[in-house]
Image: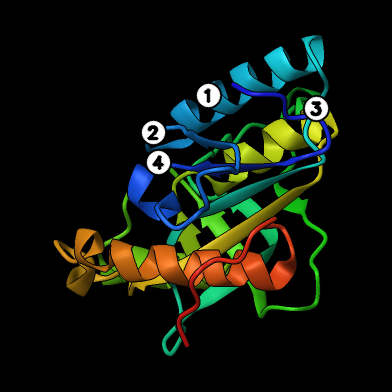
C-alpha cells in the first residue's frame, strides 16, 4: 500500500462498489462480511501507523439494503450498530464488548440515516421488519469498519447506496445494480470533497 499519510483511504467490500473511485486514490477491497473487513482494514492501518502515518480519513463506500420504503440514492451514515450480536447474560461484562451503537459525525451535505450491520444478506420481509425499528439501512461491513477506525483514532465516513429493498425482491438483483451504485457513490464522495479529482456524476 502506498503512503497514506494526509490522504483519504477508500474501503469497499467488492471491486465493483469502488469502480468509479479515481485510480490515483488509495483503495482497499476487503471482501464481504464483518470479519474480512476488520482484518483487511486493521492490516492496512497497522502498516500505515508503523510507516509513514495514518490516513486523515477512511471512507467506506458500498451498497446497502433499505429497511424502509421509498429510500433511494446515497446516504451518509450517522450511527451504526451490529444487529446479529446477541449476548443475553446478567453479569458485568460490558467492558469486554464493543459499543452497541457507534455514533458518526456527518457533513450535513447528504441525507443521513442509521445502519444495521450483520453477517447476512437480508432478503426476507420478516427480518426486514424486525430490523426496521433499529435502522433504515442494512449492510455487512459498516460496523466493523467504524469500530476499527475508532480503535485507531482515524475519522471515518460511511457512504451507502441503496441497492435493494432487503426483502424477497432483493434475491438475485444486487449484482445488477453495482454499476449504477458505483457512479452514485463516486458522485456523493465528490460532493463531500473527499475525492481529490472529480468523478462522474449521476442525477
Q: Is residue 49 left or right of residue 148?
A: right
Residue 139, percent across and down? 45, 54
Tell me the distance, in whole angstroms, between the alpha carbons under discs 4 and 2. 12 Å
Viewer-side label of 2, 3: 3
Q: Nearer the viewer, residue 183 or 46?
A: 183
Q: Which mark sits nearer the N-terminus, 1 or 3?
A: 1
Q: Nearer the viewer, mark 1 or mark 3?
A: 3
Disc 4, disc 3: CB below 8 Å? no
Q: Which residue is mark 2?
A: 31
Q: Earlier in the sequence, mark 2 or mark 3?
A: 2
- Is any atom of residue 65 visible in this view? no
Residue 2 can be seen in this image: yes
Near-viewer residue (111 or 199): 199
Instruction: Give SS at disc 2.
Output: loop
* Tag in front: 4 or 3: 3
Asked which quadrant contains residue 174, the reply is bottom left
Rate crowding at label 1 as few (under 14), some (14 to 19) or many (20 or more) other CA atoms within 10 Å. some
Q: Secondary structure at mark 1?
A: helix
Give how far across and how far down residue 96 sits, in percent.
75, 22
Q: Measure how far apart labels 1 and 3 are at the Cα level.
A: 15 Å
| Residue bearing mark 3 | 54
| Residue that protrudes farthest toward the left in the picture | 172
Count residues near mark 3 (Cα–Cα under 10 Å), then give few for <14, some for 14-19, many for 20+: many
- Marks 1/2 in contact by CB < 8 Å: the verdict is yes
Q: Badge 1 is on which residue?
A: 40
Amino acid at each position: 500500500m502506498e503512503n497514506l499519510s494526509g490522504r483519504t483511504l477508500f474501503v469497499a467490500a467488492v471491486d465493483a462498489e469502488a469502480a468509479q473511485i479515481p485510480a490515483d486514490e488509495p483503495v482497499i477491497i476487503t471482501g464481504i462480511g464483518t470479519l474480512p473487513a476488520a482484518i483487511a482494514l486493521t492490516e492496512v492501518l497497522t502498516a500505515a501507523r508503523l510507516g509513514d502515518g495514518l490516513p486523515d480519513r477512511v471512507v467506506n463506500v458500498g451498497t446497502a439494503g433499505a429497511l424502509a420504503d421509498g429510500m433511494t440514492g446515497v446516504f451518509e451514515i450517522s450511527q451504526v450498530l451490529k444487529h446479529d450480536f446477541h449476548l443475553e447474560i446478567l453479569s458485568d461484562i460490558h467492558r469486554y464488548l464493543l459499543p452497541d451503537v457507534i455514533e458518526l459525525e456527518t457533513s450535513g451535505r447528504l441525507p443521513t440515516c442509521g445502519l444495521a450491520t450483520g453477517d447476512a444478506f437480508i432478503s426476507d420481509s420478516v427480518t426486514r421488519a424486525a430490523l426496521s425499528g433499529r435502522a433504515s439501512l442494512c449492510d455487512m461491513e459498516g460496523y466493523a469498519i467504524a469500530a476499527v477506525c475508532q480503535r485507531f483514532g482515524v475519522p471515518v465516513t460511511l457512504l451507502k447506496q441503496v441497492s435493494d429493498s432487503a426483502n424477497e425482491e432483493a434475491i438475485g438483483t444486487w449484482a445488477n445494480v453495482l454499476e449504477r451504485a458505483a457512479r452514485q457513490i463516486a458522485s456523493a464522495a465528490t460532493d463531500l470533497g473527499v475525492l481529490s479529482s472529480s468523478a462522474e456524476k449521476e442525477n
